[in-house]
Amino acid sequence: MRRLRRIKILATLGPASSDLAMIRRLFEAGADLFRINMSHTPHDKMRELVATIRNVESSYGRPIGILVDLQGPKLRLGSFAEGAIQLQNGQTFTLDSDKTPGDAARVHLPHPEILAALRPGHALLLDDGKVRLIAEETSKEHAVTRVVVGGKMSDRKGVSLPDTDLPVSAMTPKDRADLEAALVTGVDWIALSFVQRADDVIEAKKMIRGRAAVMAKIEKPQAIDRLADIIEASDALMVARGDLGVELPLERVPSLQKQMTRMARRAGKPVVIATQMLESMIQSPVPTRAEVSDVATAVYEGADAIMLSAESAAGKFPVEAVSTMNRIGEEVERDPTYRSVITAQRPAPESTAGDAIADAARQIAETLDLPALICWTSSGSTAVRVARERPKPPIVAITPNITAGRRLAVAWGVHCVVAEDARDQDDMVSRAGQIAFRDGFVRAGQRVIIVAGVPLGIPGTTNMVRIASVGPEGDANM
């Protein structure tokens, strides 16, 4: 099944989208990979969803990626004696280590690491930012705060700390158990929440040991100042705009989205734009005009993928949400200005053989107006480097490795085919033409460009470009 757009769609599964028929419909509507949110999914359900996705994958013969999103640390208040209180602007309110139920003057904060790290002047955001406190006096036992923005506060509400660098791991005991269960099941991507520094990603990678790729979710202000290091340590990036918009001024999020998208592309790492993209479609079959513009902006910006959360997981119109996103992507990419925007953002190639080959292949394909750029790739890295160039023709990636094929489901413009590895260069060229012909990318008599590494089958050896003509039966020859 060939997509008519380059940007990929990541759809979250949930109560509205858990059975085989619905997942099949979501894939047909345009979903390229699926997200399983471990904040709401027990292990048995996760295994069931993975098996169902693999069933859909086998019936279509096209790799489908699976991303498991770890919950990360959840920082919450304790409970109140009356269940809820009302905080008034200007009042003093204390957070402490006393487990006694709270009142209008104080409440238990069951996170000693927060009390140890807080400093006077640091902000505390409660209940997704609805209530804002400023720390005035801090110690390891308590923090005296002033209420800047008051409101109702009840048991176990969440706490966010935009100014505080917390000395905690991004991996909780629950995350470690969820991660191991996901890896045993054979998922392709792990989304890591609460990333503050590159060490958080490195810690997760030590546990994963190459069994899945790691996508760092950027949702903490502390990650912004260390973004370059986090991108270098990660395999991909997710711009988690919802949490960023809680801990940072809302007006900063659009510019940060652009910066992160461009930084990830420059590094050759896939980037996903997430949260509230078609939020109104949870209840409505039609999105708002502003939401359509928001999705279109991510496409124009050259993001690798756009994500649906509750829209596909719990909404009333999951299939419509995916198909709407699909149509927006197709329409934007048909816009005559789209190519000029994407080209203007193209980063210079890095000083590596792989980047030089990818850049040269893109230039040749566009100069000759070739219908497809074909990559033979063992690990998937060749296709990712070519995707970094955002070439005008579609990218057909051929790999003998199903794991690489599934991970490439998130990469911009890559149509991946899993096939037996080439025996030699003649076989590689011939079958590249046959596969591109079979999947509708080229017609007999057209030429294609082929990128590969020699010797064949060895990862990281991208060093060859070939131009080949496609014969009447689809086989290509140099």
Image (spheres, rainbow, N blue to C red):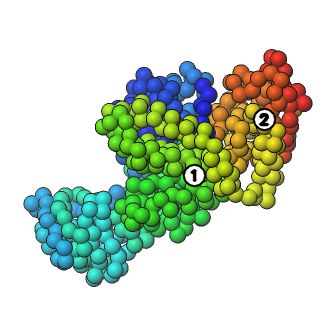
Q: Is residue 145 above or below residue 313?
A: below
- Amino acid on which disc 2 is placed: Leu
Q: Is residue 255 left or right of residue 379?
A: left
Residue drawn at x 47%, y 59% is 254
Q: Is residue 298 left or right of residue 245?
A: right
Estimate how packed mark 2 is, as few (under 14), some (14 to 19) or many (20 or more) residues with alpha carbons within 10 Å: some
Give the number of callouts. 2
Estimate how packed mark 1 is, as few (under 14), some (14 to 19) or many (20 or more) residues with alpha carbons within 10 Å: some
- Give SS at disc 1: loop
Res. 301 mark: 1
CA gap, disc 2 and disc 1:
24 Å
Residue 108 horizontal/vertical position (percent) = 21, 67
Q: Earlier in the sequence, mark 2 or mark 1?
A: 1
Identify the residue under disc 2: 370
Residue drawn at x 51%, y 34% is 327
Which quadrant does the N terminus fall into?
top right
Residue drawn at x 77%, y 45% is 362
Q: Is residue 453 above or below residue 99?
A: above
Residue drawn at x 78%, y 35% is 370
Q: Is residue 79 visible?
A: no
